[in-house]
Amino acid sequence: MNGRDEMRAADADREAVAERLRLALNEGRLGLDEYDDRLRRAYDARTYGELDALTTDLPGTVPLERSAVVPAAAAEVVTPTSISGPATGGGVAPWLFDVWGTWLRVTGIVVAIWLVTSLLTTDLLYFWPGWVIGPWGAVLAVRTVTGIATGEPQRWRTERKRKGKKGKKAGKRNR
């Protein structure tokens, strides 16, 4: 063991290991239970040695030009023209609806309740739905911007396709 293994790890180091574990989960290298266990241990880790032990059996990142592995599919780059174009296999729009869909439905319900109560009292009531939809919408706006910047729509689409294939296979087995 060298001196680095006993050195205290920072939060940024724990986050980097957590991200590597998330990538390993998305690649199918870790099962959900194992990922959950390692993620818990990553956030509990105090030293670099404890963090290193969580990823030693996972392949490291190798620059593309030195890699002998053939990529399964080329990574997609999100551009303003690819928001809903056919070249991206659906674009960002389905992911946006998945992120914002519940917010839109709840917004419609609470605004309708506010409107009906205002009409029944024949007075324009204080717009209390703003307390529900405002902060929630702000959080979703940040999630949307960071998600698009980090390629979340592509990961979401890949995960949906993977789950869709499993669902079809399970349905055939049940027949």
Image: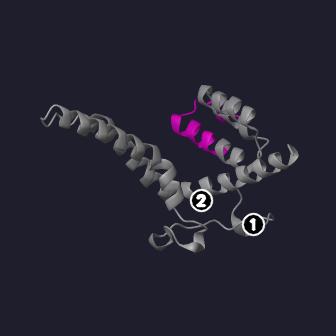
Residue on which disc 1 sits: 66
Name the residue nearer the viewer: 168 or 39: 168
Give the image location of residue 31, x and y in percent.
Answer: 76, 38
Stretch of the chain drawn in magenta? 1-20
Secondary structure of the residue carrying numbered label 2: helix
Q: Quadrant of the N terminus?
A: top right
Residue 161 quadrant: bottom right
Q: Is residue 6 visible?
A: no
Which residue lies at the image location 73% right of the left edge and 32% below the top edge? 33
Q: Is residue 128 left or right of residue 106?
A: left
Q: Disc 1 and disc 2: Cα gap in Å? A: 25 Å
Which residue lies at the image location 71% right of the left edge and 46% below the top edge? 24
Give the image location of residue 3, x and y in percent.
Answer: 67, 33
For the stretch drawn in magenta, what is the main secondary structure? helix
Amino acid type, mark 1: Arg
Q: Does residue 143 lie above or below 92 as drawn?
A: above
Give the image location of residue 79, x and y in percent.
Answer: 48, 70
Amino acid type, mark 2: Gln
Q: Is residue 14 left or right of residue 134?
A: right
- Is 21 inside the magenta-drawn segment? no
Earlier along the polypeptide chain: callout 1 or callout 2? Answer: 1
Q: Does residue 7 lie above or below 66 as drawn?
A: above
Residue on which disc 2 sits: 154
Q: Residue furthest left?
A: 123
Residue count near mark 2 (Cα–Cα under 10 Å), binned few <14, some 14–19, many ≥20: many
Residue 114 quadrant: top left
Q: Is residue 157 visible?
A: yes
